[in-house]
Image: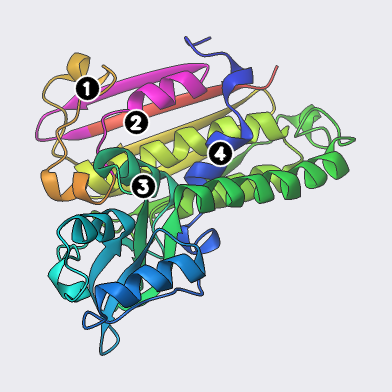
Amino acid sequence: MSEISVAEITRVQELIYELKVEEVMVRDVITCSPDLPISDLKELLRIKRISGMPVVDADRLVGMISIENLIQALEQGALATRVRDHMTGAVQTVRADDSVVGAVTLFAKFGYGRFPVVDAQGELVGILTKGDIVRGLLHQMEVRWHAEEIERYRASHIFQDIESDQTGLILRYRVVQHDFIHGGEASSKIKRALDRLGAHPRLIRRVAVATYEAETNLIIHSVGGEIIAEVRPDRIKITAVDAGPGIEDVDAALKAGFSTAPDWIREMGFGAGMGLSNIKACADEMRLVSTVGVGTRLEMTFDLQ
């Protein structure tokens, strides 16, 4: 077994990978105009009991103003100035359809207290704080705990009804290069299939996390590929295969934190270099073969017996 025990693959880890920002964000966003006087901003923050808000001009997000900005303005005796004079104009946003794990990475990277949430058209649709993520995770953990209690009486073997003839199930999912909108669909579908078959929730979490990481690697680093899930009475095997460009240094790629992702990928909250390490922690066996200019084949095996 790998360095991290199965028991450490928690519900929280699974949920961070599965949940979308839109499932935990606050939709009723308090905003202000860039022309709002700083004196009025002071009262607005006090009355609403918040520490910052998006700045919107004609329904367009133009900045963020925080209590830190307000304090600086007060120290300068600038009560007669306006929000536009003190706001942060270069706004880092998150997409509503981004994964929570991507948002967590951005919080760690920038150290901000909140992020405006925008839709595919760039319009403001919500606000996200670390507290929102925690509350969303706790709610989903409670929901899933009840679901697992209902399912816990199921047979421990997911192929109890067809074990005698060693029948298996093979699932295939195409993954497109840089298609972050549909990223995670393969892992989610495999998770649902295992759940319907009655697999143990802990096993499902391990497979889902590892498959998500492999799927994300295909989206970021390859020209596109395929996720293949083979479910058999004694094991589950997940294979991620692509046709290039291949990994130049496999040993380096296996080290935690090593990444060749470009800056624009990192700015989206991906490419931290932990994917293969997380896969290794989840799977009972992992095999990686790659040839530059040919492609990469990653096999992950999960024992059922």
C-alpha gap between disc 1 and disc 4: 23 Å
Q: Which residue is mark 1?
A: 253
Q: Position of residue 23 (x, y in %)?
A: 54, 61
Task: Please tell me how crowded label 1 is: few (under 14), some (14-19), or many (20+) other residues with Cα within 10 Å.
Answer: some
The numbered disc on residue 102 is 3
C-alpha gap between disc 2 and disc 4: 14 Å
CB under 8 Å between discs 2 and 3:
no
C-alpha gap between disc 2 and disc 1: 9 Å
C-alpha gap between disc 4 and disc 3: 13 Å
Task: Please tell me how crowded label 4 is: few (under 14), some (14-19), or many (20+) other residues with Cα within 10 Å.
Answer: many
The three-letter code of the residue at mark 1 reads: Ala
Q: How is the image coloured?
A: rainbow
Q: Which residue is mark 2?
A: 275
Identify the mark nearer the N-term, 3 or 1: 3
CB under 8 Å between discs 2 and 1:
no
Name the foreground residue: 244 vs 118.
118
The three-letter code of the residue at mark 3 reads: Gly
For this view, does 8 lie left or right of residue 265?
right
